[in-house]
Image (cartoon, grey):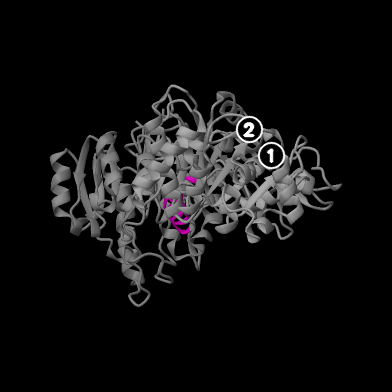
Amino acid sequence: MVSATVSKQGFVEEVEIQGHIIDSLILPKVLDEILTHGGSYVIKDIRIGQRQADPSYARIEVRADSSDQLHEILNAIHDHGAAPVAVRDCQTVAADMDGAFPEGFYSTTSFRTQVRLKGEWIDVEDQEMDCGILVDAEGTAARCIPMADVRVGDRIVVGRQGLRVFPAETTARSNLFEFMASPVSSEKPKGVTVREIAAAMKRTKESGEKILAVLGPAIVHTGSVEHICRLIRSGYLNILFAGNALATHDIEQAFFGTSLGISLERGLPMEEGHENHLRAINTIRRLGGIRRAVERGVLKSGVMYECIRHDIPFLLAGSIRDDGPLPEVVTDVLEAQRRMREMIHGVGFCLMMATMLHSIATGNLLPAWVKVACVDINPATVTKLTDRGSIQTVGVVTDVEPFLRALVAELGREE
Amino acid sequence: MRQPRILMCPPDYYGIEYEINPWMNRARGSLRERARQQWQKLHDVLLGLGVIVELLQPQPGLPDLVFTANAGLVFGNRFFSSRFRHAERARETPYFDAWFAAHGFVVEHLPEGMYFEGAGDALFCGPTLFAGYRIRSDVQGHQYLGRILQKQVLPLELVNPYFYHLDTCFCPLAPGEAIWYPDAFDAYGRRVIENHVPHLIAANEAEARCFGCNAVVVGKTVVLNTGCTKLAADLQARGYTSIAVELDEFIKSGGSAKCLTLRLDGEEAAVWE
């Protein structure tokens, strides 16, 4: 499925034209035809003949808003000698075992990708990096598939024939975050960044797409819980990914007013406070889960409380150092990945705050056209994210509390 | 000085048996005897100009074999045989090919899938091959010829169905000089011709519809259909003598003087070396 944020003019075909195309004005005529039919073009390659008798050559990427428009343009320019670059269908090999790709499999990126099936370019669904591409039995659709999900007989794309990838510059980059010369810096005016992020969130909400938040426990430690609750209540947070720690300290705060034993009112350790988070987990486990705790009226505030109250889907993924964990935590990482994949459908914007582990995990799942803002006090978190291929990320190096305070104020001003 | 050689085919089986251009109308058939006389007149005029006229044996069932200009493109001793767009005319090809093979030409064919209608759509003016496309020939065929001949080819889109071959609207007289009918081309084609042919004589609409551009050039003499008096005067002003031959029986099929002839030794305006 191609999200609405994929660029306008998303139907593309490459054509080539050769011969005496300069003096005969055939090339300008072809380019004019493309424009007058409402399309656009990018000249990917051009070689002009050196002498009068020498032929010239041009390879042109033709773009249109719809399949019909593209075919109309291709028909019009074909009469002047511009023909699609000869391409063949992609090649597939049947998987010979469960849980592994055939040798030579095509390894995906997070960029919009198309495969050629029966002569037509088809968008690869569920675009995700570091996967393979599964072609359905009819040979009419394709989607990304993680290695572990492969089953014997699945038709997996191999090689690079009949494949094309649209790098980020050619997908929608026209407004989001273009102001950023470098994607991460601690030396940017935060006010501008916050305004842009708020505007992006507002556009996402208006377009009916969802905003995903990936949160670490520093949200609670820094006293940002109420800001997150306000985002949830005002419809700016639609899905939550986190770990055991965020939920635990959020509930600890709701029960005891502390986070890791530190009083959020006074900023000082409380007597026996180090036990608080374990007591909070224990209470929730005794009640059978966070939802039951809310339903029973035991849990009455905080991020998890608001999620339950506002039907915000959340996924708590476990890790090896977790205490408890809380009953909702998914401790099988493959199962957690699978659920996250299902939940990111329809996400148009992602806010990652104060967690390296969950940010990178989510970054791996998101297609490149979903814009990401990563807020962390440590620049390395953002750098790691982009180094792993999530290049659509804009980083903000700051403590999350002042950032969130400004963001909530900005969103409130726009309302 | 070379002696001009032209291939013609007597109109023994000429007639309007199908309709493949806007001129043709089976209800308005040709008068065989009158056609015969008109063709003979053209033949005799060319002989009188010192032309060696070669004759192709007419064939029953091939009424348009008389239009030898569409047989193919001659370049030196190479004959690039046409690939006709219409099946009716494609049947002529074996007869043209046989004649050229028997007369010392190397017969070559364009790759399948390309339409190309010979000297009807490909005319040298100087070293450049001007080529009409879209209605009969297609642009790929001309670009292919450019590669093979190592010559500059300028494909020109034909936009008026009444002027379906280049030789109905463009007639090179000498390098850098030609008769043309501008409205048969789009704006790009007009600019290309104006950029590459410095001396142009424009036919008006009435003369173009009298096939004034479909002329045979022999030295400084231009043989064309009757009824083109302004064009004749313009030609005279540029130092050409014009001879009018009545050819209205052939205009019923969409052809005139040029269509009835194929120059075998290179058109007057062609520069091959």
Residue shown at the point (43%, 65%) measured from the top left: B12
Q: Main secondary structure of the magenta part?
A: helix
Q: Residues within 10 Å of mark 2 (few under 14, many from 20)?
A: some
Judging by the rendered image, the residue that carries numbered circle 2 is A270
Q: Residue at x 40, y 53 (%)?
A: B134
Q: Amino acid at mark 2?
A: Met
**Closest to the observer: A325 or B43?**
A325
Residue A335 higher or lower than A174, as above or below: below
The spot of residue B224 in percent (x, y) is 25, 52
Q: Is residue B63 left or right of residue A389?
A: left
Q: Is residue B104 visible?
A: no
* Residue reaching furthest to the top: A187
**Which quadrant, please, contains the N terminus of chain A?**
bottom right
Residue bearing mark 1: A276
Q: Secondary structure at mark 2?
A: loop
- Say left or right for A202 vs B98: left
First to last magenta residue range: A68-83
